[in-house]
Image (spheres, rainbow, N blue to C red):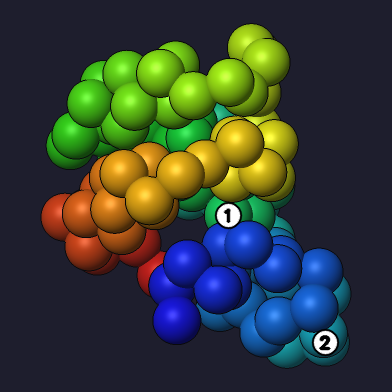
Amino acid sequence: MIIHRLDNPSTNISYTPHHLSRIGIDINPICSCNTQSIADSNHLILDCNRYVDGRDELWRAIRHTSSPLPTNLHTALRHAENDLYLNFYKYIKRNNITI
Ligand SMILES: [Zn+2]
């Protein structure tokens, strides 16, 4: 389910503050990490300073794909193979990120 949601961000329900705000729920779409970043999946997984446990390992896995750099979540997943999906899954679970 997590990977399906990551792969299809425009067609699936998301529980990020950004998405909830877009569908009319009264929630601040700006991340609480004080970077003034939109709290979407891309920010929460790849950039947010609230979720750093294992991020170096995740970026190492991304760099081992054919994804051009710098990248974003959508592009990294387009170049992903099973190992990278597993790395994303572990990272999201480890940091208890709600996407
Ligand atoms: Zn953040």
Between 22 and 89, the residue placed more toward the observer is 89
**Mark 1 within 8 Å of ligand 1, using the beta carbon:** no
* Image quarter of residue 83: top left
Q: Which residue is mark 1?
A: 41
User: Where residue 42 sits in the image (x, y, percent)?
Assistant: 60, 45
Q: Which residue is mark 2?
A: 24
Q: Secondary structure at mark 2?
A: loop
Q: Is residue 57 left or right of residue 1?
A: left
Q: Secondary structure at mark 1?
A: helix
User: Where residue 77 sits in the image (x, y, percent)?
Assistant: 59, 45
Does 62 appear above or below 10? above
Does 42 appear above or below 68? below
User: Where residue 12 sits in the image (x, y, percent)?
Assistant: 71, 81
| Of pointers 2 and 1, the one earlier in the residue sequence | 2
The residue sitting at 47% across, 67% down in the picture is 3
Does 89 appear above or below 54? below
Q: Gap in Å between the C-alphas at discs 2 and 1?
A: 18 Å
* Image quarter of residue 92: bottom left
Between 17 and 66, the residue placed more toward the observer is 66
Three-letter amino acid code at the position of disc 1: Ser
